[in-house]
């Protein structure tokens, strides 16, 4: 089946950086899906949309909590979507998931999984930021 695979998580001190990667296993991610998003879920909290990218253009979307610190990008040659996370804070600690939708990103709704309707989800990669 078509699976999304995340990688790049880890443990860093506050102020550190990580780059998460999302790729398709057995299928072309950026060629087959028009909207790819990153979500996170911290223990005891609801899943939160972090960033999303329209793979056919240049549109990107960010949660207010990560603007200026996180950058979502794609490398079509590598068929990978990245989430560069800088100036990490303890409150960024969570399991991070990537998700893909064949449809175009619905603007800022791309950060709301129920409204965007992502059809393919990865298993997640853990990010832990220590104070």
Image (cartoon, rainbow, N blue to C red):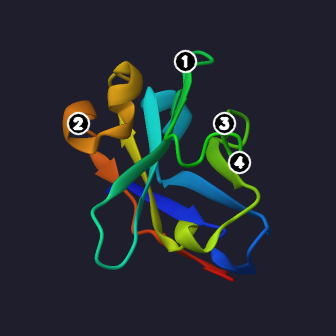
Label 4 sits on a secondary structure element that is: loop
Label 3 sits on a secondary structure element that is: strand
Q: How far apart are the two marked residues, 2 and 4, measured between alpha carbons?
A: 26 Å
The mark found on residue 32 in the picture is none
Q: Are marks 1 and 3 in contact (CB under 8 Å)?
A: no
Above or below, 37 against 11 in this view is: above
The mark found on residue 69 in the picture is 4
Above or below, 42 against 34 in this view is: below
Residue denoted by label 2: 117
Q: Is any part of residue 28 visible from this angle?
A: no
Label 1 sits on a secondary structure element that is: loop
Q: How far apart are the two marked residues, 2 and 3, measured between alpha carbons?
A: 20 Å
Looking at the image, is mark 2 or mark 3 earlier in the sequence? Answer: 3
Viewed as shown, does residue 62 lie left or right of 32?
right
| Horizontal and vertical percent position of residue 69 | 71, 48
Residue found 53% across the figure and 73% down from its top: 93
**Residue situated in front as seen by the camera: 123 or 28:** 123
Residue denoted by label 1: 56
Q: How far apart are the two marked residues, 4 and 1, measured between alpha carbons?
A: 23 Å
Q: Are marks 3 and 4 in contact (CB under 8 Å)?
A: no
């Amino acid at each position: 089946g078509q699976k999304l695979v995340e990688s790049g998580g880890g443990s860093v001190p506050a102020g550190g950086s990580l780059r998460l990667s999302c790729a398709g296993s057995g299928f072309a991610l950026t060629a087959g899906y028009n909207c790819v998003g990153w979500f996170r879920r911290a223990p005891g909290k609801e899943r939160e949309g972090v960033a999303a990218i329209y793979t056919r253009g240049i549109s990107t979307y960010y949660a207010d909590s990560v603007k200026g610190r996180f950058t979502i990008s794609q490398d079509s040659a590598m068929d990978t979507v990245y989430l560069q996370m800088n100036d990490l804070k303890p409150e960024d600690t969570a399991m991070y998931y990537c998700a893909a939708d064949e449809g175009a990103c619905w603007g800022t709704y791309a950060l709301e999984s129920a409204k965007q309707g992502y059809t393919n989800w990865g298993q997640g990669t853990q990010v832990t930021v220590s104070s």
